[in-house]
Amino acid sequence: MRCVCRIVLAEMLLAAMAEAQPKRVLYLTHSAGFRHDSIPVSVQGLGAGGMVEIVATEDVGMLNAATLRGFDAVLFFTSGELPVTEQQKRDLLEFVRSGKGFGGVHSATDTFYTWPEYGELIGARFNGHPWVQPVRFDIEDPEHPAMKGLGAGFTKLEEVYQFREFSRERVRVLMTLDTASVDLGAAGVNPGTEDFPLTWCRRYGAGRVFYSALGHFDSTWRDARFLGMMQEALLWLTGAVDGEAMPRPIRRPSFAPNTIGNSATLTPRGTISPGSLISIYGSGLTPGGTMAAEAGRPSAKLAGTTVKVGGVRAPLLYASPGQVNAYVPLTVRGTALTIEVAAPEKAAAEVAGAEATPGIFAVTATREWAILWATGLGAVQASGEFQVTTLRPQVTVAGANAPVLYSGLAPGWLGLYQVNVAMPPGAAFPAALVFRFGGSESTVTLRPE
């Protein structure tokens, strides 16, 4: 009995010791083609986190079965045709298939063009970098460990790659380019393309694969957001943390019947107006993720989804597979409008356009005044430092006229209007407040304290 207990205890201690050992990553930075100046900074940045042990090398000879047994993952920042043998190639593939990790950054897709299996392993091949500028990156899968600290996305100076031999059916896309931040007509852009994945992951046999196209500049490797992403990605690659890597099914978005309208009330259904916040209901409206934009900072692309209204890109406040909340720019005009959702497959719905589609979110009130928080009040014009509605509302409280003190955009908010009214003298509460605007009428009950 004592012997059995000692054996069990020893096994537990060995397991605990194994877990306590840092995960080891072989970081290969051999350049057989273009060599990036950011490589030394990348070595320093990856090693600073202390979350995994980084062994950086230029020696491709370390890609062999015996050496790889001492590592949990391999990470490439490479270029060109690396001088390795066919046996080394087999050893690397078997290393990953057996349950270990393989990662690549930036020019790792500009490597091994004559080795077909490598293209399959990493998921795509480099096909030019048409933009070198500040761009916005959209987080498509916010639940993956590598993406969790990045919010809805971020903007960064980068050399932006595009790819060939890429398919969403083989990888799980984590981050894409927000094309509102670039010129799609620039020289060298893949024709007819609006989907530019830049970071993805996948399973390869029992192993894990992660790739990010970022990393060209020193400044990228000094950016805490990118370094945090890479360190979390290495934890995932080495099996220290879990995260989904299965490709998401490619689905065409669909719209639920008669469920597009202003976000406050959806009424009138199937009708929208310039300057309004609208909600769209359906299925497949994002590739699978759910994301809210930062307060006061809507995104042209959110959780992998874009929306156009009348051909104009609509900023997004919230996106999920079943619901998207968007802002209709004040420049949108027309009595018949098309709403297009791209996720990245596209679908379109026809809606009516109106001058205004009033909807009240909430009312705050005292016995002296009330503020209506609304959307869909239509066009505005400048009045000093404020933007006031061109249409004027009429408000009554308990049947008596309530003078409108202000009707216009709520300062600092997109698509949110406020209407300030003075209470009529002697109003008894609770009282019915009737709001008339542009031919529509809404009633709310006031119960000020």
Image (cartoon, grey):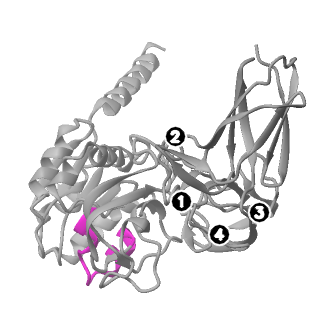
Dot 4 corresponds to which residue? Answer: 251
Marks 4,2: beta carbons within 8 A: no
Dot 1 corresponds to which residue? Answer: 246
Disc 1 marks a residue whose amino acid type is Met
Residue 83 versus residue 233 in the image, above or below: below
- Find residue 4 and name its label: none
Does the segment drawn in magenta span residue 420? no
Whether residue 210 is visible to the viewer of this picture, yes or no, is: no
Disc 4 marks a residue whose amino acid type is Arg
Residue 181 versus residue 146 in the image, above or below: below
The image position of residue 168, as x and y in percent, is 50, 70
Local packing at callout 3 (Cα closer than 10 Å; few below 14, some 14-19, many 20+) is many
- Find residue 271 and name its label: 3
Disc 3 marks a residue whose amino acid type is Thr
Q: Secondary structure at mark 2?
A: loop
Q: Magenta segment range? A: 105-123
